[in-house]
Amino acid sequence: MSSPSSRTTPAAPALIWTALVLVYVLWGSTYLGIRIAVESLPPLASAALRFAAAGLVLAVVLRLRRGPGALRVDRRQLGSAALVGVLLLAGGNGLVVLAESGPPGVAVPSGVAALLVAIVPLLVVLLRTVTGDRPRGWTFAGVTVGFVGLVLLVLPSGGADQVPLAGALTVVAGAICWSIGSFISGRLRMPSDPFVATVYEMFAGAAALAVLALARDELRGFSPAEVTARSWAALAYLMVAGSLVAFTAYVWLLHHAPISLVATYAYVNPAVAVALGALLVAEPVTAQVLLGGAVIVAGVALVVSTERPRRPAGETAAGTAGEPARR
C-alpha cells in the first residue's frame, strides 16, 4: 500500500512504543488468526469477507469524519489502488490463506508462513535492481543471507515435522505478489490519502478473492452453522486487529517515529508469529525452523538497517526495501 511521507513530527515516547507494540503483536498474531479461521471457514471466501467488512468500516469512518468528498478519487487513482489491492490482498494474502488451510502435513504452520513472508523486503530489493536501481553492497549481502535462510527453512528433512514444500512455495508466490504490489505502489498515481487508498485496495482485493472463491467452488456444501465459534472469533479478530487497528497504528507511526524504528516490525512479526503458534496451538518448532528462520530474520534486519537511513525524506516505504505483508 502507499505510505505517507517519512517526515516525522515529535510524539511522546510512550505513545510511539504503544503503537509499535500494537504493530508487533497484532500483525504478528494475524498468521495464527488465519490458521484458526480456515479450520472451518472457506479460505478465500473468508478472506474476501474480512477485507470487504474492514474496507466498509474504514469507508464509513472516513465519510463520517471528513464529509461527502472524503473518498473522492479520479479514475487513474482508482485503477492504481485496485491493481495494488488485487496484488497485495488477493495475491499476497490470499495465497498465504490457502497455504495455511488444509490438514496437518499439508497446511503450512502459521509461524513458518510468517517467516517465509518476511522475504518480501529481499524480493523488493531484487525488483529495484532489475529496474535500474543500485542498492548498497550490504543490502545485497542481506538479500543473499535471507535467501540462504529460505532454502534452509524449506529444505526437505525427511521428518514428520518438515515444512510442506507445496505450501511453502504457495507462500513464496504470495510474497512475490505482495512484493510487486508494494514495489509498484510507489510508482503509480495512488490516492494521496493512504486511508482512502486502503479502502479501495480492500474492496478490490475482496472482489478478486470472492471471484477466486467462486471459481474454486468453495461455497458448495458450505453451511454457516458448521463454522466453529473460534473460527468466527478469529475472523472478527483479523478484521478489527489486523485490518483496522494495526494499520492505523502503522500509519500514525510513519508520521511520528523514525522510519528505521518503524521498520523493525519487519523482523519482529515473524518471531511473534512463531512464538504464538508454538504456545497457543502447539505448532512444531524444529531446529530446522529455528535455524532457517533466524537466518531469514538476520538477512531482513541487514537489509532494513542498511536501506532505511539513506532513503530520501519524501520517498514511500514501499519504494525502498519493501514491506512485509500487513496481514
Image: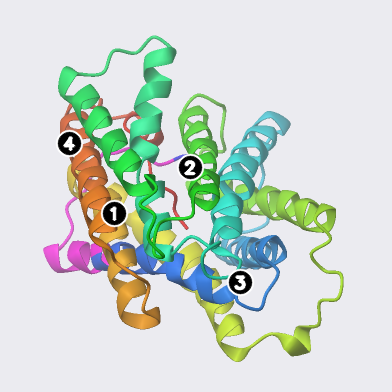
> Is 35 in front, or is 63?
35
Tag 4: residue type?
Leu
In this view, the residue farthest toward the right is 220
- The residues tagged by marks 1 and 4 sit, at their Cα atoms, a distance apart of 21 Å
Q: Earlier in the sequence, mark 3 or mark 2?
A: 3
User: Residue beneath label 1, please?
Assistant: 253
x%, y% of residue 182? 47, 36
Tag shown at residue 38: 3
- The residues tagged by marks 3 and 2 sit, at their Cα atoms, a distance apart of 19 Å
Can I make out residue 255 in this image? Answer: yes
Q: Earlier in the sequence, mark 1 or mark 4?
A: 1
Q: Quadrant of residue 152?
A: top left
In the image, residue 77 above or below residue 292? above
> Is 232 in front, or is 187?
232
Query: Which mark lies nearer to you, 1 or 2?
Result: 2
x%, y% of residue 291? 21, 51
Q: Residue at x 68, y 38 (%)?
A: 78
Q: Is residue 242 one of those drawn in magenta?
A: no
**Magenta part of the protein: which range?**
3-20
